[in-house]
Image: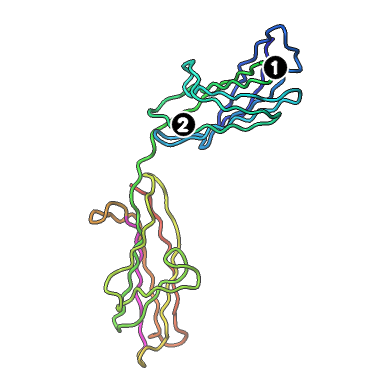
Amino acid sequence: MKLAALVLFGAAALLVAGCQDTGSVSRESISTHVELASSPPAPHVGEPVALTVTAHNDQTAVRTVAIDYTGDGTVDETQSFDAHTVAATFTHTYPATGTYDVRVAVTDASGAATMMSGEVTVTTAPITVPVAFVMSAFSEQDGRCYAVDPPGTCVGCARLVGTSSPLPVTISMGQQPQGAHLSFTQGFRQSPVVFNNQRYACDFRARLVAGEPGHEQSIGGGYCETSSLVTGEAQLKCWIAVSGTVP
């Protein structure tokens, strides 16, 4: 006798390979439903992947769940149970790229085994590059120029990037994969309007840079201005939209 069912394995489909009737076990006693899932669905070389087997049998308890990570016919790990519904999670790291046949055997209390298999594709992790966001400001009148709101600072916070700061403010964005498109908007303001009885203007700059420190290259940038020098209503806030693609 053979049973066939379709279950999901990450983004791929798995086919239950079937179960063999020994002749002494009834159909009902071996009706174990088995599913397999991977996390992440498409692991990279050297990245741990969790393979979770869930099994349920209304008639009899599930006793063991065994797994063969590479389909070479050798059981790599086995977990024991005594319940009608079980979940067994196995963790494995694949050392090389390729498509691997993962085989699972679930045995119930009657000794019947339900077999299933599926594929997991392992790829090389994308190359990542350090990326940073750089803010600077200049005021000919020695004014005070601030960055506000994300991504430069938290909501409601302000960071001085004007002439009182000796260097531009650099904020790491961590490792980003090559080809990734990054885009965001940074807000700026000058405060107060009058500083030591002198009105002033701020010239703000923002850049995205990629590469190791000392070897960065700009991948996007922009500028905006604020001023209390103009007659009429002062322009005290501005925003810069920055975007770029990681090389």
The one of 24 and 6 positioned closer to us in this rendering: 24
> Looking at the image, which residue is at 36% across and 67% down?
223
Task: Identify the main secondary structure in magenta.
Answer: strand
Could you tell me residue 190's position as x and y percent?
41, 79
Mark 1 vs mark 2: in front: 1
For the N terminus, give its image quadrant. Answer: top right
Q: How far apart are marks 1 and 2 (CA)?
A: 29 Å
> Does residue 65 appear left or right of residue 70 in this picture?
right
Which residue in the protein does label 2 denote?
92
Q: In which quarter of the image is residue 109?
A: top right
Q: Please, what secondary structure does the residue beneath circle 2 have?
A: strand
Which residue in the protein does label 1 denote?
110
Vertical comparison of 148 with 112: above or below? below
Span colored in magenta: 199-209
Could you tell me residue 189's position as x and y percent?
43, 76
Q: Which residue lies furthest to the left in this view?
A: 214
Q: Please, what secondary structure does the residue beneath circle 1 have?
A: loop
